[in-house]
Image (tube, grey):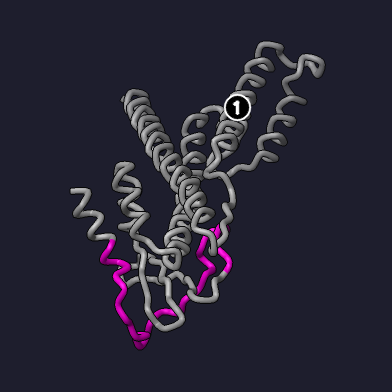
Amino acid sequence: QQQQQQQQQQQHFDQEQEQQEPGLPVATTDDAAASSPKARDDVKCFMLELADGDRAVVVQRTDGKRWRFERSSIEFELQCDAESLTTWLESISDQMLPGLLTLLGSEVSDRGARLKETEKERDALRGTDDYGFFGLDGAECSDKDVERAYRRLSTQLHPDKGGDEQRFNAMRERYDQIKALRGESKRSGGGGGSIKWDPCSRASMLHAHSELREQLVWITKLMGEVESQAEDMRRRQRTHHALTCS
């Protein structure tokens, strides 16, 4: 099965002479990740929007020959074993590697952004009651909003201001829980930042490939965990709401 997957990948960059098609979408590098390589003299890379709305990376040589890397390349790299990965990389020439790296970099950036949004949603679900206590929307508020809300209630509930000590401590505990959740999200992040490589050095590009793939595997695994946590919290909230209303 992995051999069949590998053959499918090969089809995306078979060395065939292609002519520029009329109406081909304007190629840009705006959507590429910050790790996009500097240009080589013999090839250029650009992002291409496909008919189905997905994106691909095209590598075009100066004589017009082109290779294309699509999302199926990403899925193959996430699922293949070490031996198949080695064989796959050996089949990709130095001219073609920048295209694969650009695709991986773009995917790391996109999935990292989605991971952060999902973590934000999960944390809002975690602390719904705590945020509500401070009159905040967990999915929309900023750290400064949290701080201002805490200070406002502190002036009302602090024992030195005539407030009740037990209520003040309970408020402080809620605030600490919110801060811990928001800090946890920031620590987990969504990728390790920009990855550079020398497009004229295969060793440099293979090293960058290893780092990008490691980030992609990590982000994908963490995304699954966070989505599962968020769905579990939604289910518990629905159950709680049903019991409260019955």
Identity, as a three-letter code, of the amino acid under mark 1: Ala
Residue at numbered disc 1? 180
| Secondary structure state at the residue bearing disc 1 | helix
In the rendered image, the residue lying farthest to the top is 166
Position of residue 92 relative to residue 157, above or below, is below
Residue 181 x/y as whole percent: 56, 30
Residue 66 x/y as whole percent: 37, 75
Position of residue 44 relative to residue 33, above or below, is below
Asked whether 9 falls inside the magenta stretch, the response is: no
Q: Is residue 198 left or right of residue 223?
A: right
Residue at 71% from the left image edge and 27% from the top image edge: 153
User: What is the quadrant of residue 73 in the picture?
Assistant: bottom left
Q: Is residue 146 left or right of residue 65?
A: right
User: What is the quadrant of residue 144 in the picture?
Assistant: top right
Residue at 51% from the left image edge and 63% from the top image edge: 32
Which region of the structure is painted magenta? 10-38
